[in-house]
Image (cartoon, coloured by chain):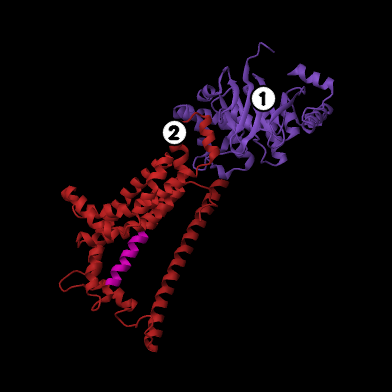
Amino acid sequence: MATIAAAGSRGRRLSFDAAQRAATVLLVLVALVGLWELYRLVWSSAGWTWPFAVNSTTMPHVWTILKAFGEPAQVNQPSLATILFHKTLFTAKEAVVGFAIGAVVGFAIGVGLAHSRLAQRGLLPYIVASQTIPILAIAPMVVVWVNPKLPAGLQGWGSVAVIAAYLTFFPVAINTLRGLQSADPRALELMRSYAGSPWSVLWKVRVPASLPYVFSAFRIAATASVVGAIIGELPSGLQSGLGGAILNFNQYYSIEPQELWATNIVAAALGIVFFCVVVGAERLVVRRPPEVVE
Amino acid sequence: MSSVEAVVQVSGLTKTFPRGNVTALQDIDLRIDAGEFISLIGPSGCGKSTLLRVIGDLIEPTAGTVSVNGKPAQKARADRDYGIVFQEAVLFDWRTVAKNIGLPLEMLGWDRKRRQARVQEMLELVELGGFGDHHPWQLSGGMQQRVAIARALAFEPALLLMDEPFGALDEMTRERLNLELLSIWQQLRSTVVFVTHSISEAVFLSSRVVVMSPRPGRISGIVPIDLPYPRTVDTREEPRFFELVTQVRELLRHGGEQLLPEEEAALGERS
């Protein structure tokens, strides 16, 4: 009975925490909107032009942006919200697949590096170097190399997923390596006393110990995969995703800036959703003392 | 005595660590018979933990031989001839208490049903019957250490190696666990090698106390403990207990060099 009561109060406390957290997030959002409008008001009424002149083009009203969702971007088309919804799904597909490829490849690289000091010395500099090359320089090559080999269903978006994977594998590889090395040396001694094979040491000690590290990499990779997918669409000439929409609305910015802003908000929201999914998965998978959980 | 099989036989053991050129152990000879409870005691740096790890083949000796159950230590480790308990419980947070205890059984390839039955037995043995589904962080330090003991004993190893297992616990908990450990040892009739820096703990538990001195680590003497088993809370108040504590303390203080001839002879007889 005592444990049931304790579990119940713990559940209540958790839902209270969640409500409190949601309220905080909402409060900050309201504050940001308020700041945006206040800044507009002060700068435009004072006529300040530093760092830039404030007007409906540089900083559209928040309500203008929100209203744009309900209106068609072009005549005889569905509302911007409907169009962005489909484009978001398309980009999300690229990002999810890119994240999955990046996570698997990154994890495998991390495991490989953890088991060979030679590989660490020899390959790590190049893995780091791979991330110093801007994604915009890599993307056209990936499209040219990967796209022709893809089956019809993967044409176009498949190569964008590979570009997203290029951004996501790196933090996963680095953190997996660090996480695998974080295993308690005494736990490794214990496994040695059981004459444990390297395979069982990997799966029973090193991988579970690495999970907190791997998941913090997944958080970074989740948002990076959305950025990778959006940027990857640009050189691919794809019009079906958020990247295409951003490119398109960019050209009409001077006339209808609210559409680009609306698209940016949607892109940010997609990144946040990805992030939250990873955090949720982490809660389910990683078991550790409650004090350690933030 | 000669009919009893040696569980551990250490001969001419020397261990130097190349870093800093430290001689951790020098010319150690030690024979441990089946069913003995041996404590290794000495100041820090005397190599007692190193000796335990060499017996367990967790580190390799520089010179000399170690055999366990008549086999080279390496073979004994591969055969899972011993269980080990460290100063910290070293439980895996991602496993429940029951799954922590079941870990060595998984390594041995036992099926789930057999594992569960044995884990339940071990939980009862260390008096944690209702805690199988808890996670390690939900237990006190003493309970965690009992889980570690249950895990070490789960596959019924003939030899139990313990490296200051109660060193991080408060004295009350430590004394209670001492009693529990003795009762487990007598139930299972296993052999225990126990590293400690507490003189009274060593005397209370052991059938023989091996006193070591540092730089280089060597055995300065062996004190046979003739207190009868089963030992109880009252054992710690007997005059003989204090005499033996004093004997061990003297040996620790003088490093075994300034013993009276008759004491030397008495020690020689026993070991």
Q: Secondary structure at mark 1?
A: strand
At horizontal 59% and vertical 43% (from top left) the residue drawn is B139
Camera-side residue of A12 and B205: B205
Picture layout, residue B149 above or below residue B136:
above
Q: Residue B257 at what x, y percent from top left? A: 79, 27
Query: Which span of residues is magenta-colored?
Result: A260-273
Q: Which chain is purple?
A: B
Q: Residue B195 at what x, y percent from top left? A: 67, 32
Front disc: 1 or 2: 1
Q: Quadrant of the C terminus of chain B?
A: top right
Picture quadrant of residue A243: bottom left
Instruction: Indicate which disc residue B27 carries.
Output: 1
Picture layout, residue B131 above or below residue A126:
above
Label the magenta part by its dominant secondary structure: helix
**Dot 2 amino acid type:** Pro
Camera-side residue of A92 and B195: B195
Task: Characterize the local packing of mark 1: few (<14), some (14-19) or many (20 or more) Cα atoms within 10 angstroms.
Answer: some
Whether the magenta-drawn stretch holds residue A105 is answered as no
Q: What is the display colour for chain A? A: red
Instruction: Indicate which disc residue A198 carries.
Output: 2
